[in-house]
Image: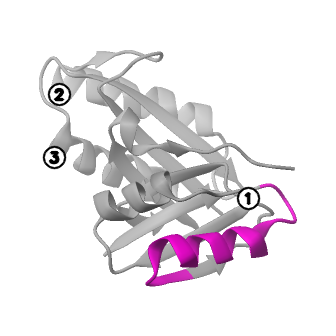
Amino acid sequence: MATLLVTVPGGREGDAALELEWALGDARVRRTKWRGVLIVRTSLSKDEALERIREFETTAIFRILPIEKFVESKKERILEEAFQLAKEYIKEGDSFAVRCKRRGNWIPSGKEIEIELGAKIKEELNAKVDLTNPDWYVWIEVLGKKTGLSIIKPEEIVKKRVEF
């Protein structure tokens, strides 16, 4: 079972939903209250879902990110849950970057979370910060009162070209 966050051009959510359903076969696509942001759930594994979308010809999809879990959008909760996930993947000497995209006003600052979480991972896991070419991304997507968290390799982020 995979959960994906998909960004699309505003107004093209319907086209993107159809493309996702065709590419994945078994997919439940849900719109969010933010233009251009969809949440997709599929019974496929994360790797299988990403591969199918990567190979499928699309016209209305910008980027696909796997989401491992959703938590309440409270700064302390995000920091704690993201750090617990990071401990499962990031090993001593690995490089990482924290990315936080904030939608809505549930947390004061995405940059603050990036800095605090990055410092904790660097210190406690003895990992290296590399903002340009990391081994791992700690990805945080704040969607109002829910926040999606993932620890992903750069190649797990699928970027597509949008046809206008």
Residue on which the image places disc 2:
125
- Asked if 94 appears above or below 155 in the picture, the reply is above
Quadrant (top left/top right/bottom left/bottom right) for the N terminus: bottom left
Cα distance, mark 1 to mark 2?
39 Å
Disc 3 from disc 2: Cα separation: 10 Å
Label 2 sits on a secondary structure element that is: helix
Residue nearest the observer in this picture, 53 or 11 = 53
Magenta: main secondary structure equals helix
Relative placement, left or right, of 91 versus 153 is left
SS label for mark 3: helix
Percent across and percent down for residue 113 are: 51, 37
Name the kind of residue labelled 2 in the image: Leu
Q: Is residue 157 left or right of residue 92?
A: right
Q: Report the mark closest to the observer, 1 or 3.
A: 1
Which tag, 1 or 3, sits closer to the chain's start? 1
Residue ID for mark 1: 60
x%, y% of residue 51? 38, 55
**From which residue to which does the magenta span run?**
9-28
Q: Disc 3 or disc 2, which is closer to the eye?
A: 3
Q: Is residue 105 above or below residue 162?
A: below
Q: Which residue is mark 3?
A: 88
Closer to us: mark 1 or mark 2?
1
